Each structure stands twice: as C-alpha cells, then as structure tokens.
Image: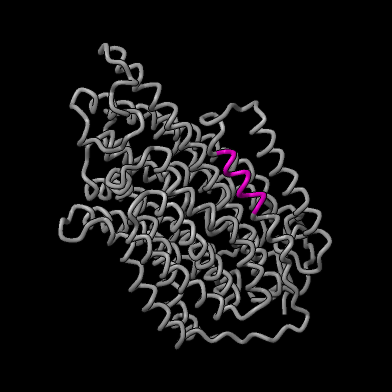
Amino acid sequence: MTHRDVLRALSGLLMVLFAAMVSSTVVSVALPQIVGDLGGTQSQYTWVVTATLLASTASTPVWGKLADLFDKKRLLQIAILIFAAASLACGLVQNTEQLIALRAVQGLGMGALQVLVQVIIGAMVSPKERGRYNGYLGGVMAVSTVGGPLLGGAITDASWLGWQWCFFLAVPITVIAFAMLSRTLHLDEAKRTDTKVDYLGAVLIAAGVSLLLLWVTFVGDDFAWISWQTLAMAGGAAAILAAAAVVETRVSQPVVPLHVLKRRDPALATIASLAVGMAMFGGAVFLGQYFQIARGFSPTEAGLLTIPMMFGVLVASAVAGRLVSKSGGVKPYIVAGTLVLTAGFGMLATIDHETSLVFMGFGMFAVGVGVGMSMQNLVLVVQNSVPLRELGAASGAITFFRSLGGTIGVSVLGAVLANQVADKIRDGLAALGIDAAAAGGAGSSLDMDAMPEPIAVIVRAAYGDATGHLFLISACIAAAGFVAALFLTPVRLRETVDLVEEIAVGEETVLGAK
C-alpha cells in the first residue's frame, strides 16, 4: 500500500480505536456517580471495570488468531457491531448487575477492536515504518484519554443529558468508522486452505483466565487466602491453564503461539507489557474516584485534573514513535519509559487527601510519559520477530498479557482499596464514638450526598489516604517491567512487512525479509 492508501485506511482504523478507548475514559470519570445513582457498592464499582477487562482479556488471543485465519476486515466489522450494540444497551440499564453484564459484552468488542487495529496496521506497513504510525496511535490514545474524562464530566454534570450518554456517545462514532472502513480498507489477503480454529485451546484459555481473575477479585474479602475456595478456584485455574499450554504446543495453529513466546525478546516484551498493563490500568482507573470522592471535585473537574497524564502520553508516544522510525532501534525508549513510569508511580505513592495538586500533576505526567514511550514499542518488539502469517496471533498474545495484567491490577488494587477504606472508616467512626454497623453502610456506599457531613468527611479522608497504597503497589509492578526491559536485545526493526529469515551479525540481530 502507498503512503496515501495507508493514511486513508488509517483514518477509519484510528476512529475505531478512538471509539474503543473513549468508551472507557468517558465512563471512568462518571463511574462514581453512575454506581451511586444505581445504588452500587465499592465492590460493584470495581466489577464494572473488571468485567470489561475480563471479557476483553479472555477474548483477545482468540480474535488475534482469527485474524490470521479469516478476513481481517470482516472480523473488524463484526467487532464494531458487537461493540456498538453493547454500548447502546449499557446506557439503558436499571441496576449495577445489568451494567456489569453488558460491560462484559462491551469488553468482548473492545478487545477485538484493539487487537484487530494493530494486526491490520501490521499487515500494511513494516515494523520500522510502524514506529512512525505508532505516533498517530499515541495521538489518538492521548486525545481519547484527555477528551474522554472531559466529555464524561461534562455529560454527567449536564442535567439535560445524564450519565447514560457516556455510553451512547460511542455509537455514532463506530457507525461513522464502519462506513469509512467499508470504503477505504482494502487488504490483499490470500485464501488459506489449511484453516483450523483451535476451539479447545480458546475455551481452555478463556476459562482458566476467567477463573483466575474471579479468585483474585473475591479472595481476602469473601473467603480467606488459605481456604477450600482458594484451592478450588486457584488450583482449578492453574490446572486449566496447564491443559491449555499442552494443547497449544500440540495443535498446528495455536491461539497463543508459545514457540514465539519462548524466544528471548518476545518473552521479555510480554513480561514488561504485563507489568505496564498492571501498573497503568490498575493505578490510573482509580484516579477519577480519588478526585471526586477524596477531594470533592465534580466529574468535569476530575477530568481536567487528569490532563497532565494524558498530555504525557501524547507527547511521549509521538516523539518516541518518530525517533524509533528514524533510528530503527526500540530498546532505549522502552527502558527509559518503564523507568519514568516507575518514578511517576513512586511520586503518586506519597499522596493523601490533602496532597498538592501541582505535585500530583508532575507525578501523573511522568506516568503518562512512561506509558507513551513503552506500550506500543513493546508491541513492535513482538511483531518484529514473527512472519506475517503469525502476526495476528503474536499481536493478540502480547495484547492479551497486557490486558491480563490490567485486569489483575484492577482486581487486586480494587480489593486492596476496599479493605483499606473499610478499616480507615471503621477507625474514624470509632474515634467519634459511632458504631460502624449503625452508620448506614458508609464503608460501602459511594453516594456521598446521602451521608451526614461528619461521616462524609471520614469517608473522603479514608479514600484519599488509601489511594497512595495503590500507587506504591503500581510502582513495584512497573519496576518489574523496567527490569525485563533491561534484558531486551538491541534489535534493529526490519523495513519490510514479512519476515523470511533471521541472521546474526556481530552483537546485533538483523532481520532479513523479502
């Protein structure tokens, strides 16, 4: 494809990606009010986020493999329809249970859109040139993450709209993207006669991951870490995933290509991506809640306060993408990005309910820069090491592990936050001589307006002081990604779409291609 053809197709792909990403960021800042209006609890608040990530994570490798076997454009159109229908239904829910269920369906489409856009771009341009286009991806990521919270806050604060429009917003965007892609996206794909879908592997992976994440969500709250429930859920998940690994090594066309992940660079990139996903999703998803509940800002103000992080993503992804395409080297930017990400979370680990917003702004900017420099470049490392026929499965695998990290991060940090908040509220109420059991569910409700002012003050302080613990955990996770990035080899990105052979020259690896 010529540069002009790529840009025409890229316009529709970027709009699809924007719709998928903005659907999360628009909702994130409005979520405290949504869950409060629907009468939900802190546990349900976490599950509204976790359900989407869970469905997205479990389905991502399947969508990636399907992209290797079937028409990529047709798969993308199906994913758009699933996502649009689920987004429309989410705006019509009457309780949090319905919202959680429909967010899972939305996550199914969201996971497909994210991986298919990367696969299609990978099928159009070479890894070296892809760094240049990753700048566009980073720009869309930043615009959606900056504009999303602002839109979500404005929509939630507008009495004539209501939070339902946070979900309805994605529908017209996806409809326009569908029409654009129908006209501009034309991939030259050969028919494959040896098509075999690994249904058993897909089912085992989805079941094992889902069971593991359910255990992570409930352990420590609904049952003890050492209990028969833990043995059944964690042990069962381990057994299912072990069976999936056996299946994936024996089938001819596996959902997750383990032979690729056995190589040094893809394995390290996967570990780093898992850490970045855990730190980013797990830490950032609670910022909107912190600003609204702990600091008392409106949804619109909370969206504005997250701009430093999103600005960091925009600047870092655009600059790093250009430099990667110019130099052909990717490791320095990943190492620097994971280091800055760790430092940013280290700064945010010190916050409480009275921390200076200027200090928080610098910490959020550092987190954004770290994400912008590392996330897409980790995908490049994996895509650079596989031939075109395995591009979908490889892209799906690294996106899967990043989403898995994010889902585990949200589940674990949500559970930590709920426990920390409950303890701090209990201590605060006891200091006032109030029995926590008789305080009207202050420890679990997110409806601050319905609380007496003395109790509301305690709840705000509890959320503010507990949030710092989440970022400390995120900093430790990001540090693990930094260590993995240090051991990456200094590969040079190939300049063609398909890979033929790999030859070692000196201390660097040069990838031969046709």
From the top left corner, tell me how far across and down residue 202 is, in percent: 68, 61
Q: Residue at x 70, y 55 (%)?
A: 204
Residue 295 magenta-highlighted: no
- Looking at the image, which is closer to me, 303 or 166? 166
Point out the residue furthest to the right here: 250
Answer above or below: position of 134 versus 230. below
> Could one spot residue 153 in this view of the protein?
yes
Asked if residue 336 can be seen in this view, the reply is no
Please tell me which residue lies in front, 169 or 85: 85
Q: Position of residue 273 (x, y in %)?
A: 58, 51
Q: Position of residue 208 (x, y in %)?
A: 67, 49
Instruction: Give the residue at x 51% y 41%.
Output: 411
Whether residue 116 is situated above or below residue 231 in the rendered picture: below
Looking at the image, which is closer to me, 104 or 279? 104
Q: Quadrant of the C terminus?
A: bottom right
Q: How many marks?
A: 0
User: Residue 165 at what x, y percent from top left?
Assistant: 27, 62
Residue at 81 percent across and 68 percent down: it is: 252
How did the renderer colour the structure?
one colour
Write the residue at 23% across / 28% down.
456
Q: Which residues are magenta?
A: 207-216
Answer whether residue 215 is magenta in the image. yes
Q: Main secondary structure of the magenta part?
A: helix
Identify the image quadrant of the N terminus.
Answer: bottom right
Q: In which quarter of the view is residue 457 placed?
A: top left
Residue 367 quadrant: top left
Rendered view: 428 above or below 56: above
